[in-house]
Amino acid sequence: MNECKISIIIPIYNKEKYLDKCLQSILSQSFKDYEVICVDDGSTDLSLTILNEYADENSKFKVFSKTNEGPGSTRNYGLKKANGEYVLFLDADDYINNDTLDSLYNTAHNNNSDLVLFNATEHYKNKTNDRIYHIHVDENTDLENFTFDYNNNINLVMNGYHIVCTKLHRLDFIKEHKLKFSNSGEFEDVLFHIKSMIYAKRVSYNPKKFYQYNRKNEDSRQNNSIKTDKSFVLFDIYEEVYKFLQKENLFNKLEINYYKFVINESLNIYNSIKEEYKEELFNKIKNKFTQMNLDDNRINRLPITQQTFYTSILKSENTDFMKRNILFEKTKRNSKLFLLKLKNKII
């Protein structure tokens, strides 16, 4: 028997600057049947003190403290302590809208959902950016009473964004499929996301932008890890995802999606990483792409940007050569488009 309707799991490591806004956004919810599982991951600032103050004033806040092991291990710890019917993951430097829990629970409860997907807004210093799930449904679809599985939206498995904070998960679903976060320290939620999207039989979608990402925090783990060799753990994750798809006999079905996933994530890291790590990353990407060994048919099924990146990596000896090859590929592509437009006008 669940003790409450929603468990909110928050991993915390040195977030004293942002905790109040995060926790106040929970206290401001119109929905009150929740618990807050706060897991301090060995903070060295005042985070634990702030958490204990909230717990002293409100019994809904349950505070746990552990040695520093990273967000994956911390979320797994939180899952063991959760007593809710559903689980919402919230990062300590982010916050949620006042109607988030009420609206999401209604969607989940009405549809007996394994997962409810919802949208987010990213807040940067000088701009905002909406993060939207692209759910392809008829415009007349009543989303309040609509469920699907990954077969209806196959791109969501590996080519949506691989984060757990914009999904409400049914706790029994997590337990049934023994879903756990990786202890890799980075990209710990990628495989969790992929498994949950594949295993979920009843996925719902609430199109509101409930989650507010704080991208102004330049010291955040996410902002910094992608710029260093810590991001190289992604190559281990590629292998884990490949083995999982083979084990579930799904690789043939999701093959192109897997290649898109690998190429797109590699491109994102390549564009973000510091110059001092770029050559080593280039060699890792080239080894991975060589191993993939895509034929022309598979390459042509990729988006143009991914085609260009994939072929340029394989043609290049190093990063300097690659820059030239990418420029050449873009020039060639633009010339083809120009000739096509010219031909159409003539015709």
Image (cartoon, helix red, strand yellow):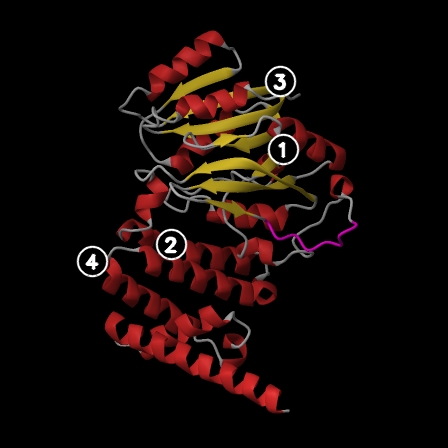
Q: Main secondary structure of the magenta part?
A: loop
Report the front residue among 290 and 322.
322
Tag 2: Cα neighbours inside 10 Å, few (<14), some, or many (≥20)? many
The x, y position of residue 266, in whole percent, is 39, 61
For mark 3, what is the residue? Answer: 32
Question: Quick check: 257 above or below 223?
Answer: below
The x, y position of residue 178, in whole percent, is 55, 39
Looking at the image, the residue that sits furthest to the left is 276
Q: Which residue is found at the position 26% from the left and 61% from the top?
A: 278
Query: The residue under label 3 is which amino acid type?
Result: Lys
Report the front residue among 19 and 86.
19
* Viewer-nearest of discs 4 and 1: 4
The x, y position of residue 122, in whole percent, is 47, 42
Q: Is residue 185 visible from the viewing direction of this image?
A: no
Mark 2 falls on what kind of element?
A: helix
For mark 1, what is the residue? Answer: 172
- The circle drawn on residue 335 is none
Looking at the image, the residue that sits furthest to the top is 57
The x, y position of residue 298, in whole percent, is 53, 75
Report the front residue among 83 and 60.
60
- The circle drawn on residue 234 is 2
Mark-to-mark CA distance, 1 and 2: 29 Å
Question: Of the residues under marks 1 and 2, which one precedes in the sequence?
Answer: 1
Q: Quadrant of the N terminus?
A: top right
Q: Which residue is found at the position 70% from the left and 44% from the top?
A: 202
For mark 4, what is the residue? Answer: 276
Magenta region: 133-140
Tag 1: Cα neighbours inside 10 Å, few (<14), some, or many (≥20)? some
Question: Of the residues under marks 4 and 1, which one precedes in the sequence?
Answer: 1
Q: Is residue 18 visible from the viewing direction of this image?
A: yes
